[in-house]
Amino acid sequence: MHKVRSEITGSVWKVEVAVGQTVAEGDTLVIVESMKMEIPISAPASGVVADILIAEGEPVVDDQVVIHLD
């Protein structure tokens, strides 16, 4: 299982995937807004989205786990 982490502190602007969805390495999973910039969080490896631990509008902090990939 891969733990996908936020690289910045900000708020979740958009969740681009759903549980059960297959993703490829490099696909955008979540977009975080910080200081009026939109920063994508990409899949570190191919897999299936097992858990989404955040929701749109929620705050996230640096290094927080946001998604689990199987």
Image (tube, helix red, strand yellow):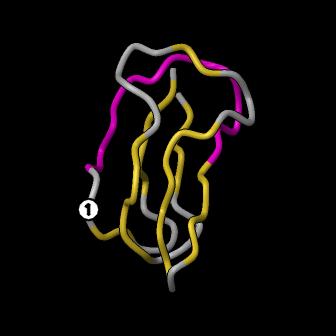
How many marks can you see? 1
68 left or right of 26 in image = left
Q: Secondary structure at mark 1?
A: loop
Q: Farthest residue toward the bottom? A: 35
- Give the quarter of the image for residue 23: top right
Vertical order, 2 against 19 (above or below)? below
Name the residue located 53 percent from the left edge and 39 percent from the top edge.
29
Q: Nearer the viewer, residue 47 or 18?
A: 18
- Give the quarter of the image for residue 40: bottom right
Vertical order, 8 against 64 (above or below)? below
Vertical order, 26 against 31 (above or below)? above
Q: Pinpoint residue 62: horizontal percent, then vertical percent.
A: 50, 73
Q: Pinpoint residue 20: horizontal percent, then vertical percent.
A: 39, 13
Q: Nearer the viewer, residue 59 or 4?
A: 59
Name the residue located 46 percent from the left edge and 37 percent from the top edge.
16
Identify residue type, mark 1: Gly
25 left or right of 32 in image = right
70 left or right of 54 in image = right
Q: Pinpoint residue 59: horizontal percent, then vertical percent.
A: 30, 70
Q: Nearer the viewer, residue 67 or 17?
A: 17
37 left or right of 54 in image = right
Q: Pinpoint residue 38: horizontal percent, then vertical percent.
A: 56, 66
Name the residue located 52 percent from the left edge and 55 percent from the top edge.
5
**What range is drawn magenta here?**
42-55
In this figure, which residue is indicated by the disc labeled 1? 57
Q: Residues within 10 Å of mark 1 (few under 14, many from 20)?
A: some
Q: Is residue 56 magenta?
A: no
Q: Farthest residue toward the front? A: 36
Name the residue located 51 percent from the left edge and 54 percent from the top edge.
31
